[in-house]
Amino acid sequence: MGKLIFVTFILSCFVISATLAADDAKDKESATAKISISGTIIDETTGESLAGVSVSLEGTDRTVYTDFDGKFKFSGVAPGEYTIKTTFISYKAFSSKVNAEPNKKNALNVKLKSLAM
């Protein structure tokens, strides 16, 4: 019986230690400034908002799609330089570098060129 209590005590200490370490890692991660990158995508000729455009942060697995107003947003991005890449059926692909910084409006307004003649 005494061994069972001792083993239970050791396992409880391990679980508490692991939980505290995970909380500490979350605190350190949240201490790193997280920012957002946003923008609007429109047709170059008509000025209409383009909905459903695929917008990716190159070098990451992050992809979002524009809403009905042509707007997109990446939240929780670490500061740094990123390449934004857009793709949309019947439009020329677009890419641009953006330097995402804290306390700065990290917005990109894109005009896509139609492939139709």
Image (spheres, helix red, strand yellow):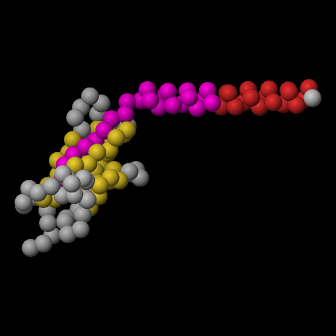
Residue at x 21% of width, y 46% of height: 39
Name the one closer to the observer, 111 or 66.
Answer: 66
Q: Can see residue 80?
A: no
Whether 102 is drawn above or below 61: the answer is above
Q: Quadrant of the C terminus?
A: bottom left
Left or right, 44 with respect to 40, comes to left
73 vs 115: above or below: above
Q: Residue at x 28, y 51 (%)?
A: 84
Q: Residue at x 54, y 30 (%)?
A: 25
* Residue lying furthest bottom: 117
Pick the residue in front: 34 or 5.
5
Q: Position of residue 104 (x, y in %)?
A: 24, 31
Q: Quadrant of residue 50?
A: bottom left
Q: Quadrant of residue 74?
A: top left
Residue 68 makes an appearance in the image: yes
User: Magenta stretch containing residue 90, yes or no?
Assistant: no
Q: Is residue 33 left or right of residue 18?
A: left
Stretch in magenta: 19-41
Which residue is at 14% across, 62% downward? 113
Does the magenta run of residues contain 34? yes
